[in-house]
Amino acid sequence: MESLGYVASFLMGITLGLMGGGGSILTVPIMVYLFGFSPTVATGNSLFVVGLTAMIGSAMYIRKGDIDFKTGFLFAIPSVMGVNISRGLIIPKIPELIVSFDFLVLTREILIMITFAALMIAASYSMIKKKSAQIPKDSAPLARGTLIAFEGLTVGLIAGFVGAGGGFLIIPALIFLARLSMRVAIGTSLMIIALQSLLGFAGDVSRGIEFEWKLLITVAIIAVFGIMIGSSVAHKIKEQKLKIAFGWFVLFMGATILIEQIRQLSF
């Protein structure tokens, strides 16, 4: 299964480079189902792999001038706070056994995977649906800035809990609130994902959590090769068609994971 995990990591990197998000949502399932980590450990592993991969991808967009640093930091700062609140305060407070009855056993691991599956289904809807109308251009800059920062905090809380970058939430905010072009939104999204993920992972390391560094670095390097290929060919592929196709794939994966975790509730 490890060999398949490496292939999946490469494909995840390609998708992240093509769309600035979406691919990272596959990292936790890769870690859980192909590398055999528990969901709690997998979310931490995912932050490292996603963060390092996104950092390399964002560097490629920086070279092209396709990153809005002001908007990116406005989003990233509260997002980093959200990740560390999730990793340092929320997850440790959740007991390993949440509910136990004759007909129902809900553990922390199952809760994380159910939440993750629900997030995948929500992400698939965001990818499949037609683009929403933009916020009117006369909306106040302060109001837009506040909304961007608030969504940054929200994405950070989600990313810390499930280990995903949250690009499917970041890019719409950058396009509709900050009114960035798609290309600049992708580059800026990668920068945000890199900051929130790596700083969230650093928080895990500072709390004494141990990781299998050899595996993590190997997976990250493979994913980096993927994101370099994805970023280099992004302008040659119709993004909307790729987004819809990937959305259906994420929907299938999310529904499969959700059904499996519901079966594990022991009804």
Image: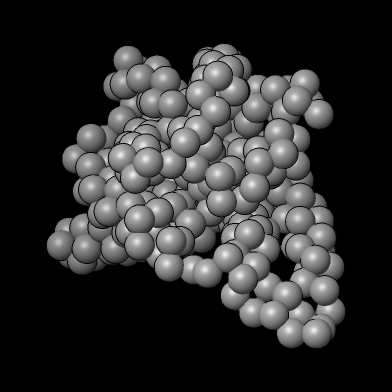
Q: Nearer the viewer, residue 97 or 148?
A: 97
Q: Quadrant of residue 186?
A: top left
Residue for point 82% across, 60% down? 260
Q: Does the rendering let one see residue 246? A: no
Instruction: Work out whether 142 lies above or below 38.
Output: below
Q: Residue furthest bottom?
A: 102
If the image is split into quadrants, where does the N terminus sit? top right
Residue for point 35% across, 62% down? 89
Relative image position of residue 115 (x, y in whole percent): 60, 64
Instruction: Work out whether 67 lies above or below 127.
Output: above
Answer left or right for 143 relative to 198. Answer: left
Relative image position of residue 199 (x, y in whole percent): 32, 39
Residue for point 17% across, 59% down? 141
If the image is split into quadrants, where does the C terminus sit? bottom right
Q: Quadrant of residue 15?
A: top right
Residue for point 81% across, 83% down? 103
Answer left or right for 166 relative to 104. Answer: left
Answer left or right for 192 relative to 160. Answer: left
Q: Nearer the viewer, residue 100 or 182?
A: 100
